[in-house]
Amino acid sequence: MKIVLVRFTVSKMATEKKFRCRKCRTDLFYDIHVQKHLRRNDESNELCAFNFLVAPLKWMSLDEYQGKISCPKCNEKLGQYIWGGRQCMGEVGLRCGRHIAPWIHIQKAKTDESSLSGVEVHAQLPPSMTVIPAAEAPMN
Ligand SMILES: [Zn+2]
Ligand SMILES: [Zn+2]
C-alpha cells in the first residue's frame, strides 16, 4: 500500500481573490487554496507559475485514487486529480518537473478571477471550501 502524504500551506490569513467557474460563475476556490512550489530544474529559486494546483476541497468529488474534477453546479470539467501525484509540466518555456502530490489541478482557462472588495477571514469561508484533511485521502 502506498501512503499519500498530504501537506498544505495556507500562508496568508485572509483571502483577496476568488476563482469562479467561467461557465456558471459558481465560487470554486480562493487564492489561499492555491498551492505554490519552486521549479525543480531551476537554480533561480523562483516559484513555478503552473496554474492552478489547489488544496483538496469539500465540494470536489475525490473518492477515487484519480479522476476528473467537475463544477459542482454545471458539471463542466474543470481539471483532474491524482492522489499519488504527477510531475508538474511547468509554464510555457520554463520546464519544471517537480513531483506534486496530491495533484489537484484546475485549468486556469476554466475559471474567472475576481478580487474581493473586503478582506475575508478563513473562518468565514463557505463549508464547501473546507480543505479535506489527510486522513480522508484514499490510498492506492
Ligand atoms: Zn460551473
Ligand atoms: Zn511546477
Image (cartoon, helix red, strand yellow):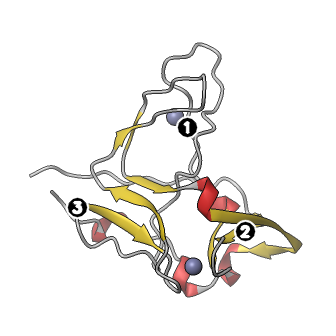
Residue furthest top in the image:
43
Disc 1 CB within 8 Å of nearest ligand 2 atom: yes
Nearer to the camera, 52 or 33? 52
Q: Amino acid at mark 3?
A: Tyr
In whole angstroms, how far apart are the C-alphas of marks 3 and 2?
A: 27 Å
Q: Is residue 126 above or below residue 77?
A: below
Q: Amino acid at mark 2?
A: Lys
Q: Secondary structure at mark 3?
A: loop
Image spot of residue 56 (x, y percent): 45, 65
Query: Do the residues bearing badges 3 and 1 touch, measured as CB atoms within 8 Å?
Result: no
Mark closest to the chain's N terminus, 3 or 1 = 1
Quadrant occupied by the C terminus: bottom left
Residue 125 in which image quadrant: bottom right
Residue furthest right in the image:
117
Q: Give the labeled residue for mark 2.
A: 18
Q: Give the labeled residue for mark 1.
A: 37
Q: Is residue 68 found left or right of 53 in the rendered image?
A: left
Q: Which mark is residue 23?
A: none
Q: Secondary structure at mark 1?
A: loop
Identify which residue is drawn at 49% across, 54% down: 8
Q: Is residue 13 found left or right of 2 in the rendered image?
A: right
Q: Secondary structure at mark 2?
A: strand
Identify which residue is drawn at 66% across, 60% down: 32
Q: Residues within 10 Å of mark 3 (few under 14, many from 20)?
A: some
Q: Amino acid at mark 1?
A: His
Q: Give the labeled residue for mark 3.
A: 65
Image spot of residue 39 (x, y percent): 54, 27
